[in-house]
Amino acid sequence: MDERILLVEDDPSIRELTARGLQAAGFEVRVAASGDEGLGCFREDRPDLVVLDVMLPGVDGLEVCRRIRVDSAVPVVMLTARSDTIDVVVGLEAGADDYLTKPFEMPELIARVRAALRRVARSAAADDDVLRLGPLRVDVAAHTVERDGAALALTPTEFRLLVELGRHLGNVLSREQLLDRVWGYGHLGDSRLVDAAVQRLRAKIEADPSHPTVIETVRGVGYRAARP
């Protein structure tokens, strides 16, 4: 295993312990102690994945993630001291793929990192196809989404979620299934991650997010992409 990970964390003890844990798992790790330093390291190294603390001196983690997303779809796992749903939503909107609440166990972080890297590998090998979801045209190979001919800007997680639902048109997918297929794990996941991602996705693709017609909620079960 030779994947390169950029760890951006301002707490020296957490940074050292996390770096050692990732290295012991077989990853090549570069560390940064601030948002500005992290952005510099990212531009120099172009790592395979970024582990990013939210609370950083200077440029915070959310802004670092937004700047990374300008020209890169590299997986980003955010570390946060809080786990409120609003924090999950804000992190996803900034472009994060996943989040982990401090304090965390190294085996869980490593599992999430490996799941994120597997998603990238599967995406690169995915079949080329175009999906139609009501007014949406989703070009999987080109990684583009259009609504009535107008391009929509989705984060990598939102795009994967839309594609997964679109490939099972009319069928209900549970939150656990979506955690497994979109995020790469089920038993480690938090269902709020799915709900927050669906909420953000609806805000971008639905004509009226409060009355969704593309992605429907099946109460007590999960979500489905509605047939036209």
Image (spheres, rainbow, N blue to C red):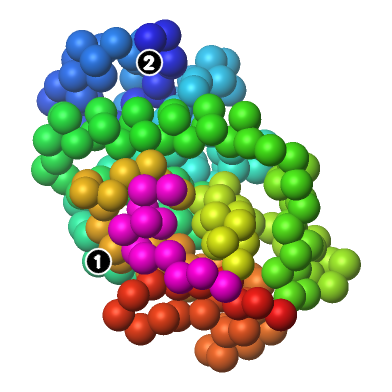
Per the rendered image, the range of residues in magenta is 170-181
Residue 189 placed where, x, y %? 26, 52
Comes first in the chain, label 2 or label 1: 2
Residue 31 visible to the viewer: yes
Please name the residue that numbered disc 2 is placed on. 30
- The residue furthest right is 149
Residue 179 lies in magenta, yes or no? Answer: yes
Name which residue type carries label 2.
Arg
- Disc 2 crowd rating (10 Å Cα; few below 14, some 14-19, many 20+) is some
Residue 50 lies in magenta, yes or no? Answer: no
Please name the residue that numbered disc 1 is placed on. 84
Q: Is residue 208 above or below residue 112?
A: below
Under tag 1, what secondary structure? loop
179 left or right, relative to 206:
left
Q: Residue at x 28, y 49 (%)?
A: 186
Q: Residue at x 46, y 70 (%)?
A: 172
